[in-house]
Each structure stands twice: as C-alpha cells, then as structure tokens.
Amino acid sequence: MLYNYFRIAWRNLLRNKTNSFINIGRLAIGITCVLFIVLYVQDELRFDRGFAQGDQIFQVNMEANFGGLGYNTSNTPPPSTISLRNSFPEVTAYTRLYQPGSLIVHNDAAADAAGHSFTERRIWAVDSNFLQVFSFALAAGDVKSCLTKYHSIVLTESMARKYFGDRPALGKTLTIDTAAAPYVVTAILRDLPGNSTLQFDGLTPLADNQLVKRFSWSWVWTLMQGFVVLNKETAADPAAVKRLEAKFPAMVRRDAARAFERIGQPFDEFIKKGGKWDFYLQPLSRIHLYSAGIGTPYENLGSIRYVYIFSVIAVFIILLACINFMNLSTAQAAKRAKEVGVRKVLGGMKVQMMSQFLSEALLYTALATLLAVGLLYLLMPAFDAVAGKQLSFADLFRHGSWAILVLAMVATGLLAGSYPAFYLTSFKPVDVLKGGRLFARSFGNQLIRNGLVVFQFTVSIALMVSTLIVYRQLQFMNTADLGFNKDHVVVFPNVEKLANGSEAALRQQLSGIPGMRSVSVSSGSPANMTSIFTDFYVPVANGVKEHLAKDVNLTSYLVDEYFVPSLQMQLVAGRNFSRDFQDSASVIVNESTARLIGWKNPLGKRLRYPGNDDQTFTVVGVVKDFNFQSLRDTVAPFALFHTSSKTYKPMLNFIVASVDSRQTSAVLQQAGNIWKQWAPSVPFDYSFLDKDYAALYQSEEKMGRVFGIFTSLSIIVACLGLFGLSVYTAERRVKEIGIRKILGASVPQVMGLLSMEFLKLVGLSVVIAFPLAGWAMSRWLMDFAYRTPMSVWLFVAAGVLALAIALLTVSGQALKAAVRNPARSLRSE
C-alpha cells in the first residue's frame, strides 16, 4: 500500500514539474536554514560541557557597589577563592587565572631570532592545579606537575608550532618579556575546542606574576577570575548552592576587613554607606551565554537572547515553507478534485486518500531534505566564516542531530501535507463530478489562503525591519560621538617593554615624523579593556556645607600633557596638563565624576587617595564625558592623572598618536624604523583606534550578518510561495483575462488587476509586521546604554522593499497572462 502511495506521488511530481520544483526548492531552503540554526544553537548550548568535572565547576562572580558605582563582574580579588576553599567544606578545590595583557615572547634558540619574537595577548597566569580542574587534553607532559615549578610554560599545539616548527617543544625554553630566567616548556596541550569559553595560547604559573604577588592580600584589586569545585551533592542541588552563597557575606566581613582598613575604608562603614561586596557562584556551563557584567577576559562569549532569537527564526522559516506547500496545494485543488471524486465513487476511504496526500508531502519533504543536506555541506564553510563558528558537517550526525533531522523531515512533511489532505478529501463526489463551481472563489478557501500569505510576509517583513535596525545600531555605534576623536588615531602598545624612563624620549622622536600631528604616552587606550585601572578615592570637603559623595570609584589613565589634544578631547572647564605647572598632584575629571560627587564647580576641588600611599589631588580641568568602553555601558566616572604622579599607577603601556590620513603609510614605516632603534627585540605592533572600537561589537556584527542571511532566505521562501500562487492565479483566470482584453482592457490594466490582489495582502502584512518588529527591537536595543532611534524611515524602507519584491515576483506571470492571445484562451468556450 505504501509503495503504491509513493509511486502515485512520484508520478504526480513528474507531471507537475514547475510546481514540484517550487515546492521542493522552498522546502529545501527552509530545512537548510533550520539545520544551520540547529547546529548553531547546539554549539552554543554545548559550550564548556566537555570537562570531566564540568558539572561541579563554578565561576566566582561579584555583585558590587563601590563608590557609587554598581556593577556585576566576573573579576574577583585574589584571596576570595582561597577564603571560599578554607571556609566551606562544600568547596573541594579552587583555581584562578589572570590575564596579564600583552607579553613579548622570544625563542632564543631560533636560527632567525628576529622572526621568532612575537607579541602574545593570550598567555594566562594560572594556579598550578588549573589543568587538573579544567581537563583539557594534553599531547605531552604531566598535568599534575607542569605548572608547579617557577618559570614553566604550557603551550597549545599551534603555539608550539609557531615557535618550534615541527621540532619537539617539550623541554625547550622561551624568553618572556624581561624575565630573569627563560621559561621551560613543560607540557603541550591539544588545540583548544572551539566551544570552550576559555581560549588561550599558553599558561604560566600564577606564582611567577609580580603584580598578583603584590596584591595577593587585596580584597579590592579585582582583576582575576576565580573558580571553585563543589562536591557532587552540592553542585547537583541549586538550593544547596543558594544556601552556600548565603554564607558568603559573613566570610567577606571576616576576611576582607583588614584589606578595607588598609585602603582607608572600614568595611562596616562601607556597607552602611550603601556599599556592596557580594559574591555568588555561576555554573561553568552558563558562562558563555550568561556572562557576568563587565571586565570579562573571555573573547567568544554568546548570549542566550540570540539563541532564543535564532530558534524562533528557525520555527518561522520552516512554517513559511510549510505554508507555501499548503497554499499551492489547496490552490491547485481543482486539478485533483476529479481524482478524489472518482476514487470516492469507486469506494476509496477518506483515510486512504489522506494517506495518499500525506505520502506525497513526505516524498517532497524527503527530497527537499536530501537537497538541504547537500546545500548544508556546500555552504558550511561560508556560514562558519560569517557566524564566527567552527561547525562541522559531521556535527549533523552527532549529538542527536541526526534524530532532529529525521524528526524535522517527518514533522515538516506531516505539517505541510495535513491541511491539503483534509481539504482535498472533504469534497463531495457528486458536486465534483457534475462540474460545479466548487473551487472557483469560495470565501473560506480564499480567507485561509490569503491569511497564510499575510502570515508569510508578516514574518519576512518583521525580520527585514529587525535586520535594518540591527545594522543601523551597528552603524550608530561606529559613528557615534564618543567624546573624543577616534579617526586617524594609531595606538602603539608594548611601551612598558622599553628601558625605564625612555617613554618621553621615544615620544619626542616620534613626534618629529612628518604627518604625526600629536603624540602622547599613557597607561591606557580607549577600547582596550585590559588597560583600565579602577581605584577608590575620597572627595575632600572645603570646609563649607557641601552634599558630597563620601567616596567614589574612579577608572583612570596615567597620561602626559599631549593625551587630551591627541584624542581631541573637549575641556569644558579648566585647563589641560602643562609643563608650565607642577602637575604631579593634579587631576582632570570627566563630567560624570563631578555629577556623582556633587561638585557644581569642580575646579580647585580635591580628591584623596587613601591608604598607605595617601595623597591629595587637585582638580585642574574637566573633560566632556567620553566612552572609553563600548556603548553598551553608560559613561563611568573617569579621571586622568599626570605621568609625574608619585602615587602608584599602572605602567605607561601605550603611545597614542594622531596622524595625517594622507601620510599614514609613510608615518608607520618611519615609526617602525624608530621603534627598532629603541627596542630591537620587541616586535613593532600597532592598531587603529577606530578598528579597536569596531572589535568591541564583534558579537553584534556576527549576529547582524547571520540575521541578514536568514532574513534574505525567509524572503526567498515567501516569494517562491507568492510566485507559485501567481502562476496558479494566472492559469485560473486565463479566460477572464481573455474576455477583458476583447472588451478593451490594456496590458497594464490586466497586469495591475492581477498584481493588486497580492500587493493588498503584502500591504496588510506591512501593517501587522511594523508594530511587532518595533516591539521586539525596542527590547533588543535595551541592551545598549546608547542606541539609535527607531526612525520611521527604516520601517518605510522595509515596507517599500517588501512591496517591490512582491511586485517583481508576481509581475512576470501577470505580464505573461496579459500579453496572451485572447483568441487562444477562449477557443474552447
């Protein structure tokens, strides 16, 4: 019986080649999209699931309010995880990581030494048990001892090949920065899987890092990531984890008090003033999609919101494909009506005929699925490049994906064939066989078919509007006024690698290059989140009644007097740093700092840096608020301190230079020559500030590209359906068109008559889609502190584009019907 069903279905497929091609093509496109989205979503949901103790590993995060600045972060103080391990039996182990920033790594044994010195930004300092907690696969070495000795280093396979080629790297040495001794390669890791949040090229012992040693006592130096391993019973019970977290505040009060006293901030007083220093645990498997706030060092974070968005898109796209199949099948019901009538007269049961039509739908779907798998194979490399993924075609047959494929094929076939099966088998054989006007233009038939067309284009237009808004937001973020000029600004890192005190001399020499407009030295560069330095300051009262904040948490750079003009920052009050003044105790603040403290006239006001390095700074200038980080976040309180400041501040890491855009190439070439004179063993590296800012929005750009692809494909699917319906409509109304032409109707009039029927439906889709897209994108834009307005012109552009696409889709068939010879159309009457 089944064989007979599929044989009849195959004959019908060959008999109606155009319709079959349309049905299979749109189903194949829909299934291809769904398969891509399934693989994408599965990859996102499988992040960090491959570790032996993965279910027991939790990241230690903070919810803090320090100096009026509230935030969530994965950055934690060095002692916090140690205290957790020592205080609670539920915590069986801990490990920490610190990202030092850029390091110069050199292979002394290389034949071509100059070619084996590189700037590395993904070498982490970690506790000795890091690779025991995170069970990355080793290619060589011992996991228990590889990080226990000073000046040892673990490399990934790619990193080892970079420095040693095909030679064995184990036991070889590398020089890192100005370390007193070379680092010995003690282990080689297999290249890290793409679905790991932790992405690095090398690991060194945390005990080697001098900065971590210096702040090992500090509960307010929060530049590390900490992880704890819980016992199985606690880790498996979310309620038990919550009970454990409830004990953390007492531990912090006990262990952090001395550290807070050391910075002049008694802990109890800090809490009374509204401060918060709370810790909580986040399962390792949730870090990728639910990252905690600011300051994370991870490069490949995702968002659960995008997982939801793409999952919904997958559902809509497959629905569009199924709706097209239903639409065209019911539209062509008249061609199958006599077949149904004859079979019913001959004793055919309704269930048998429904099985026949469902078999046809399953055959179409099976062929479409085979075509979709082929398209998936061909397009996989292009999709990976666009989405920034490392998906594999083999993933389709792993992790249960093959079951999803089969289920999707069967579900799609049943969904696509269900309505036509019920509809076609509902005909009364008497009405069918006596040649009535059963199918001409019944209201119910038209309503359902038109409703399905409206649904298709509503989805497509909503996706189109959303894509335009995403790209508009990306454009806005790349062109917004940041409070300084980022165009034609070059950033040179690794300045701290020069001999001590030579930064100013190098700056002076670089400033003499023709085309260099302004050159400055600083500890930080906008868009470089690893260079920020945040600390605690106390506003000093001037003896008059002022309602001032009692303390403030300030992010700061250490800069020279050329920094403000190099970035064309706008001084709204006071002056810039100057050689004409002794500025070792001066500070320039931004407008947000003045507002947060409560200063109406900040000039001459003072900030005290408490603790052992107690020093007071006088405000000499106020700069317009500027975004040193992405536009997802509001402008934070910020301060610029002069390089001559005696209080400890970060090293001078960067040269920031404004250049003449017409001479950029020549400037960089001369700057490279000068750099080699000063630091021949340090690679000459640079970046453009506008590109650094664009890199902050990689996740949004990837999402925008993927969104654009699926939007385009949804429009193609909708248009294929519209094309099929226009073919059917033109055939059904061929005699009507012939009569109209005989009575004097022109070709444009006939085309307008046929096209308007569909344009009205697309117009209705526009009206429905606009508020839906507006609501969805307003929620998406809430993730950004600064966002583009949803201009009405974006909606108008999407509506006009949709109408134009629909018109182009149906106009070909309309023209073909309009120019047909009416005599040939009416000769059978």
Image (spheres, helix red, strand yellow):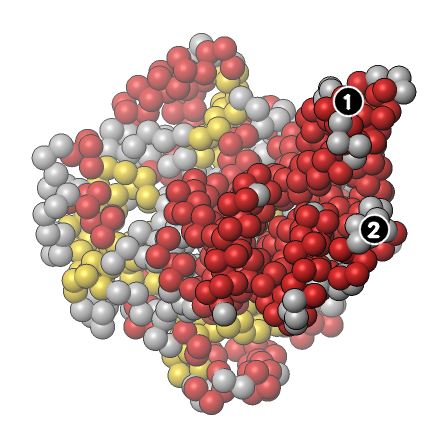
Is 708 on the left-hand or right-hand side of 523?
Answer: right
The residue positioned 65% from the left and 63% from the top of the image is: 343
> Of 58 and 796, which appears nearest the observer?
796
**Residue at screen point 41% across, 35% down:** 493
Q: Which residue is mark 2?
A: 436
Image x and y of residue 741, in percent:
84, 21
Label 2, label 1: how many angstroms apart (C-alpha)?
Answer: 24 Å
- For the residue carrying disc 2, how many other residues have a C-alpha within 10 Å: few (<14), some (14-19), or many (20+)? few
Is residue 529 positioned above or below 670 on the image? below
Judged from the image, the secondary structure of the residue bearing numbered disc 2 is loop
| Amino acid type, residue under disc 1 in the picture | Pro
Residue 181 in the image: x percent, y percent? 19, 51
Secondary structure at badge 1 equals helix
Pointer 1 residue:
822
Question: Would residue 576 appear left or right of 506 to someone viewing this image?
Answer: right
Q: In which quadrant will I find the C terminus?
A: top right
